[in-house]
Amino acid sequence: MAGNIQPIYSRIGDIQWSTSAVLTSNATTDLTSGTTYLVFTADSTNGGYVQKIRFRPLGTNVATVARVWINNGSTTGTAANNIQWDDITLAATTANVAASLATSELALNFALPPGYTIYVTLGTTVAAGYAVTVIGGKY
């Protein structure tokens, strides 16, 4: 018999973001070292839902790739605690007072267990960096 046959909805919205500009590269393939940016932590009791992650350039940047990682809430220093979920190419941007800079979004649309986290890394160091925001909900 199924554990839950009823739809589950978020109790309240949950919007989280990087506390600093995401701009330094990380060449590791398992998140165990280098510069990492924590962008979302699921509720420690009931978990959470993540709808999307948004990358907004803060000025002039070279092209790079953003990698999105799921961590089980334990240390990122142990490779078995981390999995790369997806990545997205971020186009080069040039600061301009007369036009907006292109924002990139990556759909997530999944539930996270209690205490799980989402980290972001970049493939290439950029000059101005990115503001990274996750839109989700708490159960």
Image (spheres, grey):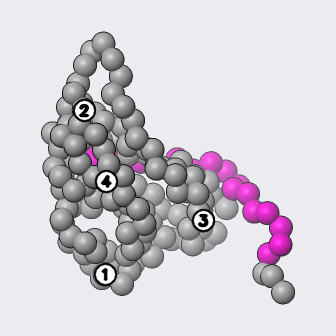
How far across and down, in percent of the image, does residue 27 sit?
A: 18, 65
Q: Are marks 1 and 4 in contact (CB under 8 Å)?
A: no
Query: Is residue 38 in view?
Result: no
On whether residue 17 falls in the magenta region, the answer is yes
Instruction: Point out the frontmost of discs 3 and 2.
Output: 2
Q: Residue at x 80, y 82 (%)?
A: 2
Q: Please say if 133 is above or below 68.
A: above
Q: Cα distance, mark 1 to mark 4?
A: 19 Å
Q: Residue at x 39, y 74 (%)?
A: 83
Find disc 3 in the rendering and name its residue.
111
Residue 79: mark: 1
Q: Cα distance, mark 3 to mark 1?
A: 22 Å
Q: Which residues are magenta?
A: 4-22
Amino acid on which the number 1 mark rests in the picture: Ala
In the image, 118: left or right of 37?
A: right
Residue 66: mark: 4
Q: Residues within 10 Å of mark 1 (few under 14, many from 20)?
A: some
Q: Cα distance, mark 3 to mark 2?
A: 32 Å
Query: Farthest residue toward the bottom?
Result: 1
Q: Residues within 10 Å of mark 4 (few under 14, many from 20)?
A: many
For marks 1 and 2 on the same chain, the one whose residue lies earlier in the sequence: 1
Which quarter of the figure has residue 1? bottom right
Amino acid on which the number 4 mark rests in the picture: Ala
* Residue nearest the observer in this picture, 62 or 19: 62
Q: Cα distance, mark 1 to mark 2?
A: 33 Å
Q: Cα distance, mark 4 to mark 2?
A: 14 Å
Q: Are marks 3 and 4 in contact (CB under 8 Å)?
A: no
Find disc 2 in the rendering and name its residue.
93
In the image, 4: left or right of 110?
A: right
Instruction: Point out the frontmost of discs 3 and 4.
Output: 4
Instruction: Point out the frontmost of discs 1 and 2.
Output: 2
